[in-house]
Amino acid sequence: MNITADMVKELRLRTGIGMMECKRALEESGGDMEKAIAVLRKKGYARAKDKASRETSEGVVGSYIHTNGKIGVLVEVHCETDFVARNADFQDLVKNIAMHIAAARPKFLSAEDIPGSLLEEEKSVIREQLKDQKKPPEIMEKIVQGKLGKYYEEVCLLDQPYIRDDKVSIRQLVQSMIAKLGENIKVSRYSRFEIGEA
């Protein structure tokens, strides 16, 4: 498959990742754009893991007020340098996460933030739902873990499918920005306010 400059340009526009990496991903995927995006995501994830231990002492607090004025969100997102904190792509990421929080109503930032008692309660509900299935305990546990994964996607911001592209989680959205900007980025905390909700 001949990889054209237009294909590389389109992939770069869609992912924000460098031309040479886009070209290599297209070569690796035989020119299939969606597969190339998946390749870049995997590589971005690897790069994000490399940067995960780096300190994030800069960042911004972003906000979003829904057009009816009844829902508002504040979100704090950290990065490594003031230079990246002022970058338009980083600012867009923060704004998009704030809009996502307004629409998707996450209850927790990540699975680690779910209280143990609530997690145990959820597991017991899942086990109760499955009690009539005659399966070995190890298979049942895998089913419980799979259903917990779905629960995390509902209630944890970082695990939720992004409202603008449900093939990507918020965690993956952040990781692709880490790959693009070359700095560690962390969503630290958020608050969602809605008229009538305590």
Image (spheres, helix red, strand yellow):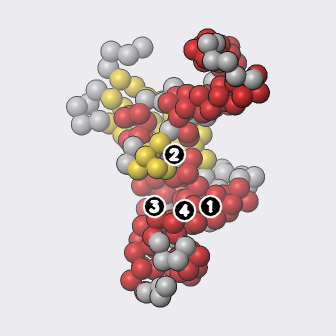
Tell me the CA gap for discs 2 and 1.
Answer: 15 Å
65 relative to 15, above or below: above
Give whichever of 85, 53 is nearer the camera. Answer: 53
Q: Which mark is residue 170?
A: 2
Q: Amino acid at mark 1?
A: Lys
What is the number of callouts on the image? 4
Give whichever of 26, 50 is nearer the camera. Answer: 26
Please indicate whether residue 30 sits to the left or right of residue 65 in the image.
right
Residue count near mark 3 (Cα–Cα under 10 Å), binned few <14, some 14–19, many ≥20: some
List the residue tagged with mark 3.
Answer: 89
Nearer mark to the viewer, of 1 and 3: 1
Nearer mark to the viewer, of 2 and 3: 2
Q: In this orientation, does residue 62 appear?
A: no
- Labels 4 & 1 near each other (Cβ < 8 A): yes
Please indicate whether residue 51 sits to the left or right of residue 75 in the image.
right
List the residue tagged with mark 4.
Answer: 38
First along the sequence among labels 1 and 3: 1
Tell me the CA gap for discs 4 and 1.
Answer: 6 Å
Provide residue 9's location: percent of width, then percent of height: 42, 79
